Image (cartoon, rainbow, N blue to C red):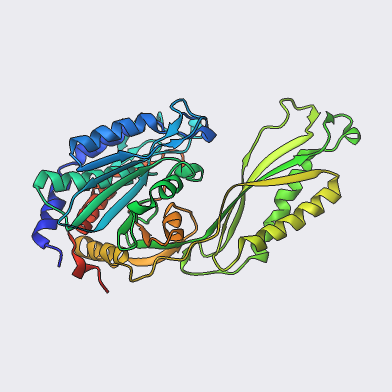
Amino acid sequence: MADEKTWKALAEKIESYRDDIVEMQRTLTALPALGPENGGEGEVKKAEVLKKYLAELPVDEIEEINAPDDRVPAGYRPNIVAKIHGKSHERTIWIMSHMDIVPPGDLSQWKGDPYKVWVEDGKIYGRGVEDNQQGIVASFFAAKALRDLGVIPSYDVGLVLVADEETGSEKGLQYVLQERKELFRPQDLIIVPDAGDPEGTMIEVAEKSILWIRFHTVGKQCHASTPEEGVNAFKAACHLAVKLDKLYEIFGDQDPVFAPPISTFEPTKKEANVPNVNTIPGEDVFYFDCRILPRYNLEEVEARISEFIRETEEQFGVKISTSSPQRMQAAPPTPDDAPVVLALKNAVRDLRNKEAKPMGIGGGTVAAFFRAAGLPAAVWATLDEMAHQPNEYCVLDYCVGDAQVFAHVFTQGEEDFTA
């Protein structure tokens, strides 16, 4: 059984790190790790700082798995793997977080500078503080507590910090799994702290399929006062976007395991077309984000979308092409009795006197890549789900509590998470 005296000592030690947690959040937030798709230079500056943090613990092993990317000044996207050796090397308990963030959006909606942390009513504000710096910081201080108290974990502990999660993971976890899949073994416990609820009782074991679609509509540009001389690509695209709302009815099944329990089909990003008001656009580009229950095949959805495209082309005399920036059929779920699920349930029960339960979510996380590779992974964190919102915040108590849960998991033995 997990040593109660040890995990209580670890929890008490982590409580003492509150000011350090805020300062680490402040440091990381000031280094906006935006991918090139979002107009940024990647994660290198943030990775360099994080490597220094890890070296100061110290960790027993650290390596960087760089994914080539000529779109960023460094020429690569960093992925960091660090390990602390445990009593046994038969398993590794991995916690995997992502370094990249999304842009802050409309700055007028922020109460302060999104890249300068401020603390208010027990909340740490700033872009990226919850998504996914809470995971980075909580896992770091769980490991620090081990080192500061001289506790040797039951198994090896691994911290993985990846790039490119927000824009598809091709240069992040996908690259790591492609280049170094042997790092991860089916018997390992893999925790991804990138989704959760305020109680910390949701253990995400299943995700919906993800389909991002870019619609490129081509008509004919002309002066807005003589629309009959052109073909309004923007108007046609708007009609298509509204038509696609029928997907909610066509693929309308519900599954209470998921939150929300339905498939979702939403227009999101809109690219600029013409720069002036009195020109009818000859081209238009918009995007859809679809999160689809696993019972539906993506091919079914794509076939229906193709029908709507043909109808729109015939109605407006335009040509519409599509591409998929991200497309992933849902991977098999992590079993409810997987060791990682049982270990998290034990920790939440002991530390919070609550019962956590396995669930599915609509959002996509990189856990899907682990599952697709045959590696059971669980997504868990304590969150108010402020990701991508203005005035994003991380609740300090949540960050402390998550670090305590991770430290508890590090002390568990085989008998704790064997069903």
Judge left or right: residue 229 versus residue 111: right
In the image, 193 versus 109, the foreground residue is 193
Question: Which quadrant does the N terminus fall into?
Answer: bottom left
Q: Which x, y percent locates residue 103?
A: 48, 35
Judge left or right: residue 242 versus residue 262: right
Q: Which x, y percent locates residue 334?
A: 40, 65
The residue under the point 28% across, 34% down is 51
The quarter of the picture where residue 93 lies is bottom left
The residue under the point 71% across, 60% down is 304
Vertical side of 326 occupied by 412: above or below: below
Q: Evaluate whether residue 23 shows in this view.
A: no
The residue under the point 85% across, 38% down is 231
Report the number of discs. 0
Q: Which x, y percent locates residue 414?
A: 20, 67
Judge left or right: residue 92 versus residue 386: left
Question: Which quadrant does the C terminus fall into?
Answer: bottom left
Q: Which x, y percent locates residue 240?
A: 74, 49
Judge left or right: residue 101 versus residue 291: left
Which residue is at the far bottom?
A: 419
Q: Evaluate whether residue 158 shows in this view.
A: yes
Vertical side of 216 occupied by 253: above or below: below
